[in-house]
Amino acid sequence: MHHWGWIIGGTAALTGALTMFWGYIRSIWSQISSYLIVNCKVQGGLQEAVSMYCWQHFKTSPYGMRNYIGWTMFVRPKKRVQLIAMEIVGTGGKLFWCGWRPVWIKREARYNQQDIMMGEKNFEGGLTLTFLRGTFNLDKLLIAATNEYNAAQATTDNQARPRYSVRHLFGSDGKPARLQSNDGACGAAQTADWTAITSMQNRILQWNPDDLGTCRLNHGNAVGQLALSPEATAMVDEIKRWRTSEEWYKSRGIPWRRGWLLYGPPGTGKTSIVRAIAEDFDLPVCVYHLATLYDNELQEHWQRMQQEVPCIALIEDIDTVFECRKNIAGGHLTFDCLLNCLDGIERAGGVLLVVTTNRLDQLDPALGTPTPDHTSSRPGRLDRMLEMNSLNDAGRLKLCQRILTEWPEIWPEVMEAGLNETGAQFQGRCTQKALQLYWKNKGE
């Protein structure tokens, strides 16, 4: 028995010595290999920039494990949502070649179903880059990737790449604990439209990045399809001038931003005018669902949005969330946090803020009150305030001309029947009548 004790003790000592010795070997090898091999980890938004840059400028090896994923996205040539296949950088890694110089890229976090459903593309693990020392200047590579990503997010008047997209921004307030993140907004639920920039971060099969994104119903004439009042038309013209006056604003130290409040009953076209402006002026739209957001989540989303200016920040039906300053939706977002985002220390240049409400009396005076000339008593947060009402004669005639084109003889009758109707109601009336006549003629 004593003999076996010596054997067991000796084995344990030998195992400990070997483990310690192996640790020394690994440490020494790590030091030696660092002279030959560079390992770099990129996280946050930088991993998006690096991934996009490598897929766009480097070639990939056809050998080894390849990773693919599918997303449902709107395909503009097909005019419908379809499943799109993409090759991604997976956790097994991917070999890229810049000429003769190889770089190994590996994703540390795995795409999962929850990420797909929520539209998340920022993964905590990040990307790991490995390459031979001297083959790449790491700083220059990261700067080139960052500059190209920023240029893709920016806009110029003559660019061909469409920027128009719609993203719905949600938070984790009210969600089960398993869907909430300990890091706040970085892990908050967000459903997003996958724009051309996002698509370029992977290798798309079959389609080009510009083929994917939000549907554009009317190319360059979305506003012209609407039956707008003269006051609304004047506001749209103002945004057209604002859109092209960035340098003028900045040269005079004026914040390059505008704020609108559109108020009135449902169906009067408050959301339609925002979508039309976004289409015609090629602006991305961020739709904030305030009832689901915590303060830190709103701040995080607002900060990320500023990477895409000029853009539209849309807050719909604010009266369903805030009654003056009180959050009546049962959430935890504070009115002070909202004000700080709209007009805080870090003013968001290039943002067209649009707030809609069905009940003007619930609006806190800190956002402003309307004046007879449709301006606001509190410029800087909301500059213009416009009441959206039922259609006038000119508006109803315009919809008749667009929808009931082949039947001008019934325009007076339809217009009379739709007196005092909202735009949505009257468009529905015209559409129903047009369908009846269309199917009747087709049957004959």
Image: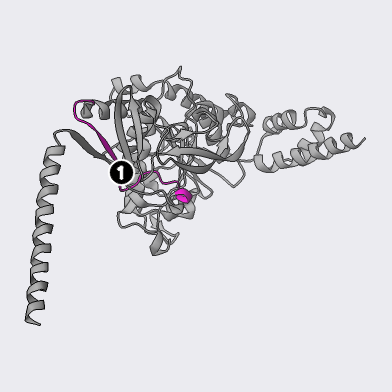
Q: In which image quadrant can residue 233 be found? A: top right
**Residue 137 location, x and y as percent?**
21, 26
Instruction: Name the residue type under label 1.
Output: Gly
Q: Residues within 10 Å of mark 1 (few under 14, many from 20)?
A: some
**On screen, residue 142 above or below 439:** above
Q: Quadrant of the C terminus?
A: top right
Question: Residue at coordinates 23% horizontally, 38% vertically from top-left?
Answer: 40
Secondary-structure class at tag 1 = loop
Q: Nearer the viewer, residue 14 or 68?
A: 14
Q: Is 315 or 45 nearer to us in this picture?
A: 45
Farthest-out residue, top: 158
Q: Residue at x 33, y 35 (%)?
A: 348
Q: Is residue 374 left or right of residue 91?
A: right
Query: Which of the two residues, 133 or 1, is positioned nearer the viewer here?
Result: 1
Query: In terms of image quadrants, where is residue 10?
Result: bottom left
The magenta region covers 116-135
Furthest toward the right, the residue is 444
Report if residue 339 is visible in the image. no
Q: Nearest the camera: 151 or 284?
A: 151
| Residue 237 x/y as whole percent | 51, 24
Identity of the residue drawn at 12% across and 63% down: 15
- Residue 420 in percent (x, y) is at 69, 42
User: Which residue, given by chain and number where applicable, does mark 1 sit on?
Assistant: 126
Question: Residue 156 colored magenta?
Answer: no
41 versus 110 height, above or below: above
Is 27 placed left or right of 246 in the picture?
Answer: left
